[in-house]
Image (cartoon, grey):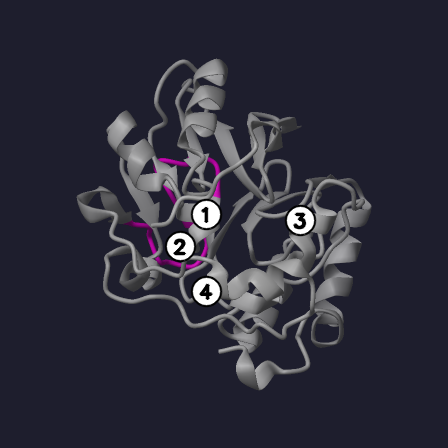
Amino acid sequence: MDRIELDPELAVPMEEIAPRVQGLRIAFVNVFSVLHVDGSWTLIDAGLPSSESRIQNWAEKQFGCPPNAIVLTHGHFDHVGCARTLADIWQVPILAHPLEFPYLTGRLEYPKPNVGAGGGLMSLMSPLYPRGPIDLGDRLKPLPTETAAALADLPGWKIMHTPGHTPGHVSFYRREDRMLLVGDAFCTTKPESFFEAALFQQPELHGPPAYFTWDWNLARESVQALSQLEPLILAPGHGKPLAGASVSENLKNLAARFDEVAVPSNTSEAR
């Protein structure tokens, strides 16, 4: 996978998003750590291809030990970038939904981007982004596929299969405080303009990154399903976390107006 040179100042910690949940924003994408009651922890997503030292240093300052696993919301380049490198350093598995396996085992690359989706610099640059295939080798293990399944490596959380952005996209829900880790199911910054908006825009709900979204009907259904959980805390793959009583109402509004505010006009080109 191609490396992307990053300014070190673009790695910004996000402390105490919720109890035992912290994040690290690297340029325009977030990774998260989830601490468990037994002292172990799990890494959610693995950032850009050149971000392994930033993630490793951040994790060592927090925990001083490797995670029990790296869990992927999906396999796009900005979420899987240094997963294999970190897994080899830490000697841990990488977990993903089986529907992502063709893109993570060297078999397939993701579809070409929809360059005209939504405008913005990210859309215009999207043909340059790595689409795979990549091969995570024997580090890759399957997540359970049952609806709202539990995961031993992420105790207290439920796995929600939320396809649409990719076939095997997943989100994670913690019922005790109604927190959602949503990957790219939706964003809290305008996804086609991450570089322009990520550092300056106030967080607000937007659909998934349109230029790489695979199936808009499934994406809509996933947002609708997540809205029914009535979350109080959201932590997305792109944008700042949101918390408070208005989160649930705003997510329901996004679900109700999804076609109007999220789906690009040239949907015939989006697959």
Numbered disc in front, either 2 or 3: 3
Residue appearing at x 57%, y 68% in the figure: 211
SS category of the residue bearing label 3: helix
Disc 2 to disc 3, C-alpha distance: 21 Å
Residue under numbered circle 4: 166
Disc 1 to disc 2, C-alpha distance: 6 Å
Residue count near mark 3 (Cα–Cα under 10 Å), binned few <14, some 14–19, many ≥20: some
Q: Quadrant of residue 269?
A: bottom right
Q: Main secondary structure of the magenta part?
A: loop
Asked whether, in this view, residue 156 is left or right of residue 249, the answer is: left
Residue under numbered circle 2: 75
At label 2, which amino acid type do we have? Gly
Numbered disc in front, either 1 or 3: 3
Residue under numbered circle 3: 195
SS category of the residue bearing label 2: loop
SS category of the residue bearing label 4: loop
Tag 4 and tag 2, C-beta contact below 8 Å: yes
In percent of width and height, residue 8 lies at 56, 28
Q: Is residue 121 above or below residue 22?
A: below
Residue under numbered circle 1: 79
Q: Quadrant of residue 114?
A: bottom right
> Residue 151 in magenta?
yes
Numbered disc in front, either 4 or 3: 3
At label 1, which amino acid type do we have? His
The numbered dot on residue 122 is none
